Image (spheres, grey):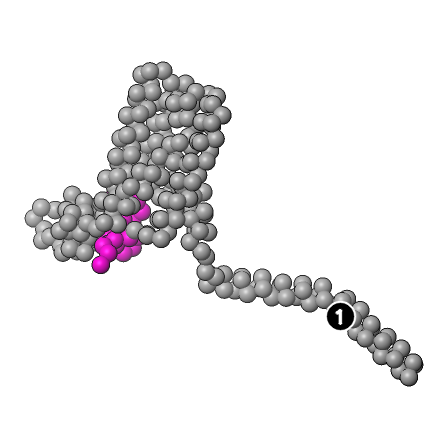
Amino acid sequence: MELAAASSSSGVSFRQRSTAASSPLLQEDQLQQEKQQVADGGSQVPRSALYQALTSTASLANLLPTGTVLAFQLLAPTFTNHGACDATTELLTRALLAVLALSCLLASFTDSLKGPDGRVYYGLATPSGLWLLDYPPGAPAPDTAKYRLAFIDAVHAALSVAVFGVVAARDKNVVGCFYGPSPAKETAEALDIVPLGVGVLCSLLFVAFPTRRHGIGYPVTNGAGGSSVST
């Protein structure tokens, strides 16, 4: 009886040691299988809205019209005198930011369509359709009813202005112009926290309510002229 019990005990302990010895190999193999599954079907792995928002927050300028971002990057150092503003350059900087914010606002209400000749034409969204800006006068006007103005366009316009404010607030030349080379501690903390919070919120809203417009300053896809009209 004692011999059988000892044999049984040794067998159990041997199996436990064998399982314990092989468990790292099993875990490693399982980990490799999971990695392979992710690699094979990575495009099918769903990503949360928060993840997409945080990703787009890292490149908020991509949510703005290309021309506006380029103008800001080129003109801000000159208008702010590289962060050392006097009364005149501070006034000019405020005017520059106002003009660029207005361009973000107006660009949100523009859209594009591909005409019968294959060219892309731009226009301004109105309650009745798209008011084409560069369409040939004598050519028959296409049906633009699906491009009519919608409430979501006003939301995107407000978000674009907010995003531009975040980009401007994170620029060292603009901060130096308005707050000096060494802002107060409370001001510095607000400049670090508030733009980040606004950026994350705007990115979340852009992900939750995407626009299908391809207006002036935004890239045009092959199927140019998607409408953001909501029913």
Question: Percent from the top left, x then y, of residue 130?
Answer: 16, 49
> Is the N terminus in the top left, top right, bottom left or bottom right quadrant?
bottom right
Prevailing secondary structure of the magenta residues: loop
Number of marks: 1
Residue highlighted by disc 1: 19
Badge 1 element: helix
Question: Percent from the top left, x then y, of residue 230?
Answer: 24, 56
Q: Residue furthest left?
A: 138
Question: Along the horizontal axis of the image, is 29 left or right of 88?
Answer: right
Q: Does the magenta stretch include residue 105?
A: no
Q: Which residue is drawn at 26% across and 30% down?
A: 99
Vertical side of 85 occupied by 168: above or below: below
Vertical side of 41 occupied by 51: above or below: above
Q: For residue 224, say whether it is visible.
A: no
Region in magenta: 212-231
Say which quarter of the image contains residue 109: top left
Question: Along the horizontal axis of the image, is 130 left or right of 21?
Answer: left
Q: Does the magenta stretch include residue 224?
A: yes
Q: Residues within 10 Å of mark 1 (few under 14, many from 20)?
A: few
Say which quarter of the image contains residue 15: bottom right
Q: Residue furthest bottom?
A: 1
Question: Along the horizontal axis of the image, is 187 left or right of 98?
Answer: right
Q: Which residue lies furthest to the front in this view?
A: 1
Is residue 84 or residue 73 the one in the foreground? Answer: 84
Q: Which residue is drawn at 41% across and 18% down?
A: 84
> Is the C terminus in the top left, top right, bottom left or bottom right quadrant?
bottom left
Q: Which amino acid does label 1 sit on?
A: Thr
Question: Percent from the top left, x then y, of residue 195?
Answer: 41, 36
Q: Which residue is drawn at 86% across and 75% down?
A: 10
